[in-house]
Amino acid sequence: MDPQTQDADGVWADFHFDGEAVIYFPLEVLPTVAELAEAKRRRRLSAEHKAKLAESNKDYRFKLKY
């Protein structure tokens, strides 16, 4: 663990054999954990942009050819 979070109460990691890890932490240290993990914000599309993407992709979606 990183020295910034290692001493924090309630912070621990569960490492898996496939190279992934699950990090458990209290909400108070979320900004620090997000910074250390280089977390990215999820992209949020407007309704207009979603409609535009759906329209441009309609020829390729959910086509079942039997």
Image: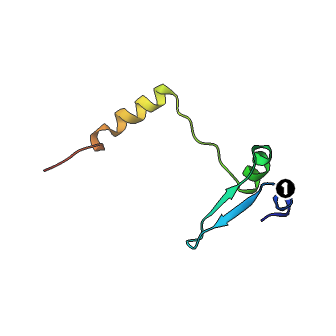
Q: What coloring was used for the rendering?
A: rainbow
Q: Position of residue 25 (x, y in %)?
A: 74, 52
| Residue sticking out furthest to the left | 66
Residue drawn at x 29%, y 44% is 60
In the rendering, at what x and y percent does residue 3 appear? 85, 63
Determine crowd level at label 1: few under 14, some 14-19, many 20+ residues with C-alpha closer than 10 A: few
Q: Quadrant of the N terminus?
A: bottom right
Up-down: is 12 above or below 25?
below
Q: Which residue lies at the image location 16% right of the left edge and 49% below the top edge?
A: 65
Considering every residue shown, the one lying at the far bottom of the view is: 17
Farthest front residue?
Answer: 10
Number of numbered discs overlaid on the protein picture: 1
Instruction: Answer with left or right where residue 6 lies relative to residue 25.
Output: right
Image position of 44 with respect to 6: above or below = above
Q: Position of residue 13 (x, y in %)?
A: 70, 62
Residue at position x 27%, y 43% from top?
62
Residue 42 rendering spot, x and y as whole percentages: 59, 42
* 9 displayed left or right of 34: right
Q: Residue at x 77, y 46 (%)?
A: 31
Which residue in the structure is indicated by mark 1? Answer: 8
Q: Quadrant of residue 28?
A: top right
Q: Secondary structure at mark 1?
A: loop
Q: For the residue marked with disc 1, what is the amino acid? A: Ala
21 or 63, nearer to the observer: 21
